[in-house]
Image (cartoon, coloured by chain):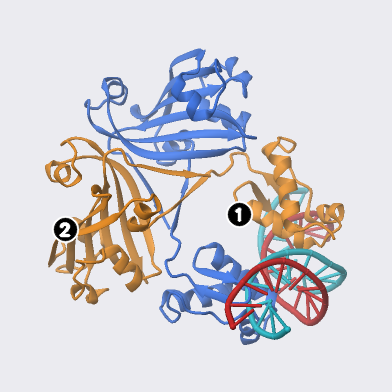
Chain colours: A orange, B blue, C red, D cyan
Amino acid sequence: MSATYRDIKAHLLGKITQGDWPPGSLLPNEVEIAQQFGCARATVNRAMRELADDGLIERRRKTGSRVRMAPVREARFSIPIVRHEIENQGSEYRYSLVSSAVTTAPDWLRARLQLQNNAQVLHLVCMHYANGLPFQHEDRWINLAVTPDAQQATFTEIGPNEWLIAAVPYSTAEISFQAAQADPALAAYLDCQQGDALFQVERSTWWEGRAVTFVRMTHHRGYRMTTRY
Amino acid sequence: MSATYRDIKAHLLGKITQGDWPPGSLLPNEVEIAQQFGCARATVNRAMRELADDGLIERRRKTGSRVRMAPVREARFSIPIVRHEIENQGSEYRYSLVSSAVTTAPDWLRARLQLQNNAQVLHLVCMHYANGLPFQHEDRWINLAVTPDAQQATFTEIGPNEWLIAAVPYSTAEISFQAAQADPALAAYLDCQQGDALFQVERSTWWEGRAVTFVRMTHHRGYRMTTRY
DNA sequence: CAGTGGTCTAGACCACCAT
DNA sequence: TGGTGGTCTAGACCACTGC
């Protein structure tokens, strides 16, 4: 049996990570590698294409494939549903709706989501608890022009995040992370001192070019978001 | 000319995002789609494999391909070199080495990087400025057992991050994000009030199973990290 | 123009796994 | 045990790009 694309990928990766092929150096072309491994060029192509997707090499027609000078370091974070995040760490999840109101979108939200004047939005405030302790405060705005059904949902049992994932499953989003100081209200919700540093995530979600929702999630004091890459 | 894998991928993606194939539903198998488009099965395979890589569908032998119930939303952050981050926003970059010392690794660092007793490390503190304003405070520890050359480098002109990328280009890392309160020293370096909420990134880097470096980067007040997905 | 990667084909065999 | 995806092949043509 001849080499698989995984064998070839592993071989090339080893040459790169162990410094045999330093940044900027030229790799052999597909035909040469195929001959060396006694396999078809398509097999080598898949291995090299995955290395390019992983950010390790750059490929150009005519000039061949080079090891990237500055490896593209991409960290990938899975964006979990908060209930799953809590349950996966072995804690008991509890959800609570704090307030719910239909209003006209405030100016800052209209600008952020490119909404029309007088756009109607549903404003929700919720809390998520892990083993009875405050875990995340959720401040959410839903564009009723895109998901009018949201006005009928009560959100007393299931959170708006899970409801929206079911209603508008495949959307695009912009997400941002920042640090914020606890104001008196957040301090009370999250059981911390006023002025404490809290980890905040904001997300705007779009579907077919229209804004669906904006949410600001503030986590309990000491929360860390971690990943490997 | 028959369909390309991009055509097919776009077609399938449209069916999913527009709700024609709701979460959990079964997609046609590869042979059916190939007949429908009048192309080879390998072409359909590539389109569907990419949709699976993107987290939109789940593929299993015998049972076929289904739209994922909860789309795997993965946000990807490129981890830039701070100099590039500053230059890309059109600001002038300035770097400054605050302190440099060779010491025995403290206990917390030994535990974190799984170092031996009495491991020697280089401890660096640096500042990065954008247009003369504090941008990022860098507190770095380098394992001299893996990169002894670091002891000869002066780090007065180029920062340790860029030096390490050249010395150990392809490594793996664990990264975490959190909010922290400015202590008196950080407040002075970053020109903010003591107690201000600051966005902090910590990263441990490994090469061939050995710890290379640990770094804690604290950003100026108001810093946000943003991406789309 | 010539060298490289990008993609497609028609076919083949195999690995997995629900029934 | 049969249906599905996973992978490989040998060949072909095309697209891009540096010379």
Residue at image location 74% in from the left, 41% down from the top: A15
Mark with earlier residue (1, 2): 1
Task: Tell me if residue B144 can be seen.
Answer: yes
Q: Nearer the viewer, residue B134 or B37?
A: B37
Q: Given the image, what chain letter belongs to the residue carrying mark 2?
A: A
Instruction: Report x, y in % for residue B177.
Output: 38, 40
Residue behind mark 2: A107
Q: Residue A39 at x, y = what percent?
A: 83, 60
Q: Which mark is residue B6?
A: none
Point out which mark residue A53 bears.
Answer: 1
Q: Secondary structure at mark 1?
A: helix
- Return the x and y of residue B189 as percentages of the image width and height: 32, 22
Look at discs 1 and 2 and give the one toward the viewer: 1
Crowdedness near tag 1: few (<14), some (14–19) or many (≥20) residues, C-alpha within 10 Å: few
- SS state under label 2: helix
Q: Amino acid at mark 1?
A: Asp
